[in-house]
Amino acid sequence: MRQSTFIKVSSAFLIGLATWAADSIEAADYPERPIRYVIAFAPGAFNDILARIVAQKLSANLGKQVIVDNRAGAGGNLGAEIVAKASPDGYTMLNISSAHTIAQTLYSKLNYNLERDLSPVVAFASSPLIMTVNLDLPVKTVPEFVVWARGNRMVYASGGVGVISHLSIEMFKQANGIDATHVPYRGGGPGAIDVVAGHTHMMTNTLPTLLPFVKAGKLRALGIMSEKRHALLADVATFAEQGYKDFVMGNWLGIMVPKGSPRFAIDKLAAEVTRIVRSPEVRERFQAEGADSMGGTPEEFAALITYEVKRFGKAVKDSGATAE
């Protein structure tokens, strides 16, 4: 090897080594200042409550404050747009939910794109959907409900057009040959109240929304869309147990950062959040709110986002739902 070639190779090696060393120092020192955590929902909402639990523990573990910044609006899209346009330095995080994957096709125009403008960090919690009916309906299981719905004029409530409580039933209708009338409400609570009153027959929504009505004996739970039975409703069979294996669905929460954020920051945040949500203390706190802990890698979260965008995109198209 000629000396000039040797010098070039050595220089390249030294530059690479210096870059690696610098990155290692940055990774070890991260974070060096407070982290802004944008929650795209209002204070006190289910998503906000769980995100604040994570933020509190993350502040303690990292030794730097994680500052919660609620930016509700446009179905969660306002907060997402703010983070998508933020500096990709590892100091701005976004709390997202399954609603953001629905928004990718529900809205004809968005000023951001989940997969183009944001990078996944970790999914940290989920709350499965449960199917509930008015107590006067002569059904106690999902198969019985399908038979009843095929022979009657079924009317179902949801928390609004294009939300998961709407699209989940549109998907169920398509899969089981059911015709039904959709009545959207401004939120899950008002919709559930009208199911109790008998103005509509059925509603599917998350545990935090419907569990109080079930526990009070005002609604009957037919099935839960989780992989296994839930501790808060141990006597309610999963959809899979009742023959509907494709209906595992719920509202999940996760963290994303601006595209281009340092990988060492993403990995550290994913590892810390996973450790937090899988701890016995936080598992119990989540369960009390009707949620299950998740955790995992950025790659696993990326796969979930891709799957959900495609899954709900088809449901939006088939139902004709639109946010405009």
Image (cartoon, grey):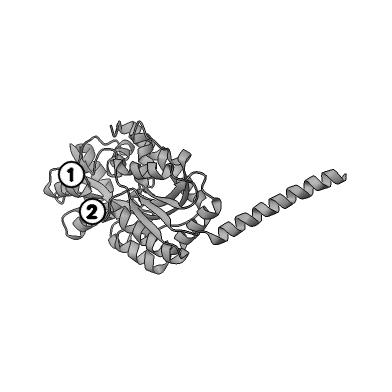
Q: Which corner quadrant of the image does residue 290 belong to?
A: bottom left
Q: Give x and y (percent) for residue 75.
A: 30, 42
Amino acid type indicated by mark 1:
His
**Which residue: 65% across, 57% down?**
21
Q: Is residue 220 visible?
A: yes
Q: Name the one closer to the observer, 167 or 322.
A: 322
Where 261 sits versus 233, above or below?
above
Q: Is residue 137 visible?
A: no
Q: Name the one closer to the observer, 99 or 292.
A: 99
Question: Mark 2 Cα within 10 Å, few/some/many (few <14, many 20+)?
Answer: many
Q: Name the one closer to the observer, 100 or 92.
A: 92
Q: First in sequence, mark 1 or 2: give its number.
A: 1
**Which residue: 83% across, 47% down?**
6
Amino acid type indicated by mark 2:
Leu
Quadrant placement of the N terminus: top right
Q: Does residue 76 appear left or right of residue 306 in this picture?
A: left
Q: Which corner quadrant of the image does residue 236 belong to?
A: bottom left
Mark 1–mark 2 distance (CA, rounded to whole Å): 14 Å
Q: Which residue is mark 1?
A: 201
Q: Name the one closer to the observer, 165 or 125.
A: 125
Quadrant placement of the C terminus: top left
Where 49 sits versus 9, above or below?
below
Question: Mark 1 Cα within 10 Å, few/some/many (few <14, many 20+)?
Answer: many
**Which residue: 23% across, 38% down?**
150
Q: Which mark is residue 210?
A: 2
Element type where label 1 sits in the image: loop
| Front tag of 1 and 2 | 2
Looking at the image, which residue sits at the far bottom? 281
